[in-house]
Image: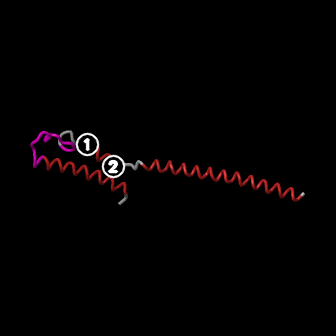
Amino acid sequence: MPLKQTEREYYKNFAAFLVKYEESKEISNGTGEYAHVKLVSGQGGDYLRQKMEDMAFHYKNPTLPIYHWVKGELFSLEAFKECTTELTRCDELKKGAKEKIVDLT
């Protein structure tokens, strides 16, 4: 399974786990100071679960743009290096050609 799809499944499974956790907590222990607090289930709690599912659906690898930028910079540096190498090579070829012309005369 591709990594991106695996990450999406983790987010979905985590949201489902939180819903089951809150339901089981309510059944087993409905008392306490924070018994009324529900993060992902109940009235108005669906918002967090929906946000988590949306986040799973729209998940993007944050390092990918940086990777492409670095790769482009490396290509630019390689191109610059090749350019300077060719410039020095052209100077050497020009010097060699002038020497051959002088030898001919």
Q: The C terminus is located in which quarter?
A: bottom right
Q: Residues within 10 Å of mark 2 (few under 14, many from 20)?
A: some
Instruction: Find residue 102 and report its horizontal and vertical position in percent.
Output: 86, 56
At x 23%, y 51%, the residue is: 16
Q: Residues within 10 Å of mark 1 (few under 14, many from 20)?
A: some
The one of 5 and 97 positioned closer to us in this rendering = 97
At x 29%, y 51%, the residue is: 11
Q: Which type of secondary structure does the marked residue at label 2 adopt?
A: helix
Q: Which type of secondary structure does the marked residue at label 1 adopt?
A: helix
Q: Is residue 92 part of the magenta span, yes or no?
A: no
- Magenta: main secondary structure equals loop
Q: Is residue 24 left or right of residue 56?
A: left
Instruction: Find residue 54 and report its horizontal and vertical position in percent.
Output: 31, 46
The one of 51 and 61 positioned closer to us in this rendering = 61
| Above or below, comparing residue 17 to residue 31 in the picture | below
Q: Which residues are magenta?
A: 26-41
Residue 48: which numbered mark, if any? 1
- Hey, which residue is sitting farthest bottom in the picture? 1
Three-letter amino acid code at the position of disc 2 = Phe
Three-letter amino acid code at the position of disc 1 = Leu
Q: Is residue 34 part of the magenta span, yes or no?
A: yes
| Above or below, comparing residue 40 to residue 3 in the picture | above
Q: In the rendered image, which residue does mark 2 sit on? A: 57
Residue 59: which numbered mark, if any? none
